[in-house]
Amino acid sequence: MTERLYRWTKQRLRQQVAVVKGEKAPSLVLRNANYLNFARRKWLTANIWIAEDRIVYVGKEMPAVLTDTEIIDCKNKFVVPGYIEHHAHPFQLYNPHSFAKYASGRGTTTLINDNLMFFLHLEKKKALTLIETLDELPASMYWWSRYDAQTELRDEEPLSNSKMKEWLEHPLVVQGGELTSWPKVLAGDDSTLHLMQETTRLRKPIEGHLPGASERTLAQMALLGVTCDHEAMTGEEAVRRLDLGYTTSLRHSSIRPDLPKLLKEMQELGVDYFERCLMTTDGSPPSFYENGVMDQLIKIALESGLDPIDAYAMASYNVAKYYSLDHKLGMIAPGRIAHLNILDDVNNPLPSSVIAKGKWIVRDGEEINQFGEFPWGEYGIKPFKIDWDLTEDDLHFSMAMGIEMINSVILKPYQIPIESTEKSLSTDHDESFFVMIDKNGKWHISTMIKGFATHVSGFASSFSNTGDIILIGKSVPDMVTAFTALKEQGGGMTLVESGEVIGNIKLELLGVLSTQSMEDVMKEEKRFVDQLRERGYKFEDPIYSLLFFSSTHLPYIRVTQRGIYDVKKKTVLFPAIMR
């Protein structure tokens, strides 16, 4: 059942009450359940009655009517609420459907998702219908509404005020942000501040994006409406946010695997109260999740010496309470959606059985596929098609300034020291040709990139923030061959050497998302990343590198649809050229 204005109709509510009255049978009963009760912060024993997708009773009694009721004895087991990932970016090669299926199998039955990809690529009505259909899955799917595109667009239409307002007002949208454009707000951007005020008026929180923020900056952003931030990189920074009244989300992701350090340093600084702390994996690439989703973070919290009640609360009750969803999520109590994890051991948060919206997702270690296939095409998410050609003569590299990678995601300008009029470069250095081309073939930017790799001959990718095409390589002919292979396979990534395709990932949806399962995407990603590393890629995460080339919330320069952009000065240094 999807979440509209009301989750349950009056008829459904009457049926649920009838179960408690003994007039109807529940669909499932967990008997002798040793469950985590967050209202009392204790483990209690009770019988848990479930009617379809809702918990209707928790207590000592058994139902008077048990017609067709499934009864599971949970003696010697531990039952906790389904886990919540509150800061998901479900478009890191995988898609929201495949990620929800995989996450639910490991106990993360609720996702609060970034809307950026749908916001930029889909017409508003289709996008909002899509998120309603996704919420019909066994997992609960909520969303945040962006205030900006996180890049410089040639066409500002996606950023219309009416479109943003309709997203913010939707019942499945539970917060505004993440606020990557906060420097503009502090500098006087009243259009974004108005949207923040609207978010607050709707009683929805605002997620910040405040890396390295001083106490004074945090205070100013709190005055403007920001209520939570996930960018603390040290225990001291996390405590600073708590001291100023923020809810603080502790991150553990592929490029910031900080949780053990954060918890250790916070405890050393005297933190022993974690009810205003959440946790997030911050939208990591597929292979990061081989070790789990929120179960992985709970395990780290347990190993860091936290009370198990705090460890589980940071991935369930604390999240639900922060988003004012604790009347529906994050607790085992009447009225809540039936998201339940059954554990064999409190110290092992990977469930042996998972119930999502009253359905078995995992039972005694065996997965039960309740997700089916998803009809992406009905919502405007179609295969990636290129109907134009690229030749070697289209690519010229005469720009004096290039981009240099400092790490996976930080770019700075550099003066190009080498002659770039030839069609191939030496492998004795880490400088390569770099091109960003409009997905419709209308404009391009050609320069050099330092630090990406030493031996990548030809690489093409449609995986980027805006879906535009990135070409990198030592050889212009191999870059063009990689582009042609990308065109033929319908989006994704291709790697070429000596005119031959040696590696690829297919991303059939918009050129950004795969239709395959998480497990299959993990294998493809690891294989492809290994190929890049063998050819000199040296940083933590090439998937994030590709996604963030155009993302203007990061320093110091970016390659955007308008051209090479100076983030601090907010100016285009070198404009894109029409083809």
Image (cartoon, rainbow, N blue to C red):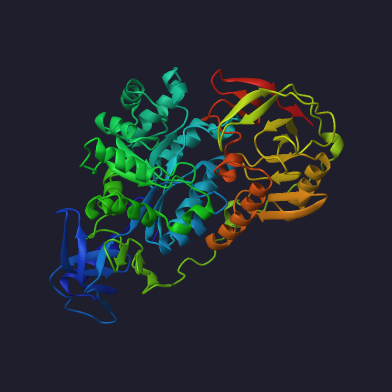
Q: Quadrant of the N terminus?
A: bottom left
- Whether residue 201 appears in this view of the structure is no
Say if residue 475 shows up in the picture.
yes
Outermost residue toward the front in this view: 428
- Residue at x 44%, y 58% (from the top left corner): 291
148 displayed left or right of 211:
right
Residue 329 in picture, x, y percent from top left? 29, 54
Q: Is residue 477 shown left or right of residue 223?
A: right
- Determine the image quadrant of residue 573: top right
The answer to whether 36 is drawn above or below residue 266 in the figure is below
In which image quadrant can residue 331 be found?
A: bottom left
State the count of labels: 0
Q: Judge left or right: residue 101 versus residue 500.
A: left
Asked which quadrant contains residue 173, the reply is top left
Report the side of 553 relative to 249 (left or right).
right
Residue 160: image location, x then y, percent: 53, 31
Q: Quadrant of the C terminus?
A: top right
Q: Position of residue 415 (x, y in %)?
A: 69, 21
Which of these two is toward me, 79 or 158? 79
How far from the left and from the top, in percent, is residue 441? 75, 38
Q: Residue at x 76, y 46 (%)?
A: 483
As drawn, the residue found furthest toward the right would be: 393
